[in-house]
Amino acid sequence: MTTAEILAAVKSRTGRGSAITSIDAELAGVLKAITTDYEFLQKSGTITTASGTREYSLPEYCNNVKEVLNEECIPIVEADFNLVIRGTATGEPAYYSLYGQKILFHPIPDDEYTITVYYAYSHPDSLDTILLDNRFKECVIEGVCYEVYKGIGEPELGTAHRAAYFEQLNILIPTIPKQKFIEYRDL
């Protein structure tokens, strides 16, 4: 799925042909909405801690942390922000808290640790590569068609496109990757 393919389909379906020269804003908005409201895009990244540093930036476009693991793949547990921020102990992180686009660890790292963060993220602003696969093509086209009509001040003309967008989205929602929970028990 490319921007050019979406543009051609939108021109055809709206009947606006040469009146539409760019759909970048509409396409970016639809991609952002789909991937912010629903966790279709997921991946992992690592954070390497430094001794004495509690706070780190989350990966760009991260909108929901799913799981945080230490180097031995043991979960680092989410804890109340006030407990994490007030703690002064140092050692290997066992707890984390989120604050905006930051992740804070407790105890405060006393060494270099590699922490793996599994997260859902929003589609990047760049449209050079659309990260959603072809299963999303109809949904994206219908969403952009509606946004085009809304953008020219005639959202009522896009009502059918809006309905088709949500119909397609409802078909896709059950395909969101499920988080695998691992339960650890001491014997």
Image: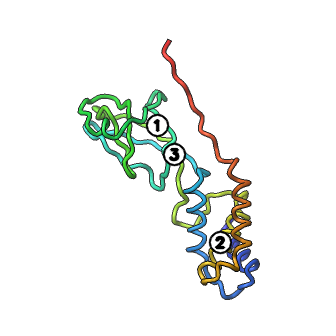
Q: Where is residue 69? Give x, y as percent.
A: 46, 33
- At mark 3, the secondary structure is strand
Q: Is residue 25 above or below residue 180?
A: below
Residue carrying label 3: 119
Picture coordinates of residue 51 (x, y %)? 27, 36
Q: Where on the picture, by quarter, is residue 36?
A: bottom right
Q: Are marks 1 and 2 in contact (CB under 8 Å)?
A: no
Disc nearer the start of the sequence (1/2): 1
- Dot 2 falls on a residue whose secondary structure is helix
Q: Is residue 159 left or right of residue 92?
A: right
86 to the left or right of 183: left
User: Label 2, on which residue?
Assistant: 144
The image's colour scheme reads rainbow
Q: Which kind of residue does numbered mark 3 sit on? A: Tyr
**Element under disc 1:** strand
- The image position of residue 174, as x and y in percent, is 70, 47
| Residue with the mark numbered 1 | 68
Q: Earlier in the sequence, mark 3 or mark 1?
A: 1
Give percent across and percent down for residue 158.
69, 76
User: Residue at 71% of width from left, 55% of height from top?
Assistant: 170
Name the mark nearer the viewer: 1 or 2.
2
**Cβ atoms under marks 3 and 1 closer than 8 Å:** no
Q: Is residue 146 left or right of residue 95?
A: right
The residue sitting at the top extreme is: 187
Report the front residue among 72 and 36.
36
Tell me the quadrant of the picture where the N terminus can be found.
bottom right
Q: Earlier in the sequence, mark 2 or mark 3?
A: 3
Residue type marked 1? Val
Camera-nearest residue between 145 and 53: 145
